[in-house]
Image (cartoon, rainbow, N blue to C red):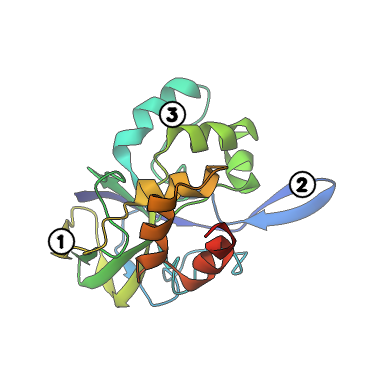
Amino acid sequence: MKVISTNLGKPTSFLWKGKEEQTGIFKIPVSESLHLTINDVSNDTVIDRVHHAGLNKACYLFASDNYPYWKNKYPELDWNWGMFGENLTVEGLDESVMRIGDIYKLGTALVQVSQPREPCYKLGIRFGTQEILKEFITHNRPGTYVRILQEGMVSTGDELLLQEKSKNTLTVQQFYELMFLKKKPKELLNLFMDNPSVPEYKKERYRKYL
């Protein structure tokens, strides 16, 4: 896996249900390296810190391999890396292989896979239609957030080098699927609950299914 674009966003205003709001999802490629900190990416825009950034969502990674699929569906958009609000566009990122809890060296930083991206209405704002939310869920390639275990710098061309594979086999894709399944398979739910790297607030939401 290799970083092919580093992306940052500036505050962008939009109207939502008659109210003016702001978002940082409109990210564009930048030439400089990104500083990954414990809670966020330096110089990036995070408007809603309840649902973005913080220990479990400090940096968002999305696969460049997914772009052809979406470009084909939305050819009218002005395409560039960062379209999904990702800080790092990564070549070769595979959510069906990457496990929750995997630890990677990334530039001079050390990061841990924490949870998939859950789409919200601001992705719809970015794409000009809220239909993208259902499509994004169905496509089942959400990208992943990472925790920053060791702060550092990451640049275009840096590789994600696996340092420690999680013993728990829950993948990013399985985590994502579990969120949207009406009936939660017991085996998958147990794998989810037994994974020490799944954020505790997420586990609390799913205890009712046990």
> What amino acid type should be assigned to the residue bearing mark 1?
Leu
Q: Residue furthest right?
A: 18
Foreground residue among 165 and 92: 165
Residue 32, visible in the rendered structure: yes
Q: Position of residue 17 (x, y in %)?
A: 82, 45
Q: Residues within 10 Å of mark 2 (few under 14, many from 20)?
A: few
Q: Nearer the viewer, residue 183 or 12?
A: 183
Label 3 belongs to which residue?
70
- Asked whether the viewer can see residue 79, the reply is no
Q: Earlier in the sequence, mark 3 or mark 1?
A: 3
User: Callout 1: 10 Å neighbours few (<14), some, many (20+)?
Assistant: some
Q: Whole-Å distance between the Cαs marked 2 and 3? A: 24 Å
Which residue has dot 1 on it? 162
Q: From the top left corner, tell me how far across and down residue 167 is, in percent.
A: 21, 64
> Quick check: 126 left or right of 36?
right
Q: Label 3 sits on what residue type?
A: Trp
Q: Compare marks 1 and 2 and give the one earlier in the sequence.
A: 2
The percent position of residue 143, horizontal first and vertical second, equals 38, 48
Secondary element at tag 2: strand
Q: Secondary structure at mark 1?
A: strand
